[in-house]
Image (cartoon, helix red, strand yellow):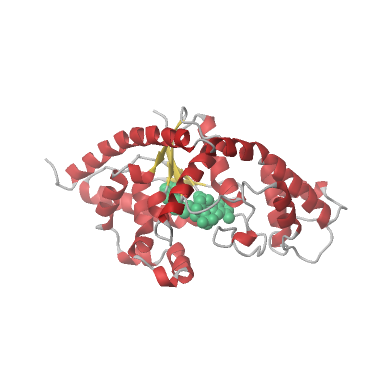
Amino acid sequence: MKPVLVSGIQPSGKLHIGNYLGALKNFTGLQNSEDYQCYFFIADLHSITEAFDPKEKRKQIIELCADYLAAGLDPKKSVLFIQSKVAAHSELSWILNTITPMGELERMTQFKDKSLRQEENINAGLFDYPVLMAADIILYDARTVPVGDDQLQHLELTRTLARKFNAKFGQTFIEPKGLLTKTPRVMSLKDPTKKMSKSQPEGCLFLDDEPEAIKAKVSRAVTDSGTAIAYDPEHRPGLANLLEIYAALTHLEPRAIAAEFDGESYAELKRKLAALVAGHFAEFRMKKKKLLASPATVMKVFDAGSKKATKIADAKIAEVKKKVGFVA
Ligand code: ADP
Ligand code: TRP
């Protein structure tokens, strides 16, 4: 049996190149390596911990499903599903809640950041978010979880909870590990000291941005006032970020890209990068448009995947219920 790999993304807005280079591109590569049994899901339960409109939510779910397929995730190779369609995620998260110390959740940086960002909606779900994430993962006996580096603290908690459950109720869960890409933290084009995030759309390159929009955003990307192109993340984070994106899309090293642009201007680098990004996602944009022309077909793929996931998850939750004494 191949080792299990699980990951998910929240349907909470358009994907940006940070999501792609930190997560989605890796999902496809890992799937195609055929080294893992892969499960990729739409984290809709997580996404309602932030303000949302139900009609818009449905659209975001369909759109993220199309993103997964357009990026190359393949239902013949991976189980593709929707978190809320597999009831065991919610059930296990409740049980895990009862072994989760409040103090551990209070330490979570994502909770602290989001609480500052949404002061009017600091709900219990936002606090409990990492426990549901732990359930998502250990329910499938996953060993490997490809994510961006902002999720590593949640994975640490996942391991703690798996260990705690095993110690208390007997060996049941595997302790998973995170898997990062070479670009686990793409920075905002507007502020290279902050990570690119949907919550700050001005700094994002979205995967379905048209070439004109990409060109405009890249040309306005914040860099330092130097002139020579060199890779120096500490002193020239804006330029380094552009070189890292360039490198990730060409499978080269940022330093090699900097050397290639030796003697050229920042403007030239930006022009070439914009063309590279626009070209790289041309096929993605086309596939996504086609998929979205027939949302029912897209959702059928995920309904079938959700049934497969339910079978696996139900067997595990039955084992958990036995271990905690709910059934004989
Ligand atoms: P956002 O922070 O934009 O709301 P999500 O939390 O939905 O993004 O993240 C989805 C996936 O993309 C996660 O695995 C996350 O770690 C990764 N990710 C998000 N932003 C970045 C980034 N700027 N660089 C690299 N990976 C990222
Ligand atoms: N918390 C992740 C994010 O914000 C999404 C997520 C939910 C996830 N459950 C997961 C990622 C399980 C990996 C495994 O991006």
Question: Looking at the image, which residue is at 69% across and 59% down?
Answer: 233
45 left or right, relative to 246: left
Is residue 136 or residue 166 the one in the foreground?
136
Is residue 208 or residue 233 the one in the foreground?
208
- The image position of residue 137, as x and y in percent, is 38, 45
- The image position of residue 126, as x and y in percent, is 38, 62
- The image position of residue 151, as x and y in percent, is 47, 54
Q: Quadrant of the N terminus?
A: top left
Residue, far left? 328
- Does 235 appear above or below 263? below
- Does 130 appear above or below 292? below
Residue 253 makes an appearance in the image: no
Question: Looking at the image, which residue is at 74% across and 49% down?
Answer: 274
Residue 21 makes an appearance in the image: yes
Residue 86, image quadrant? top left
210 left or right, relative to 199: right
Q: Quadrant of the C terminus?
A: top left
Question: Looking at the image, which residue is at 52% across and 40% down?
Answer: 66
- The image position of residue 220, as x and y in percent, is 74, 60
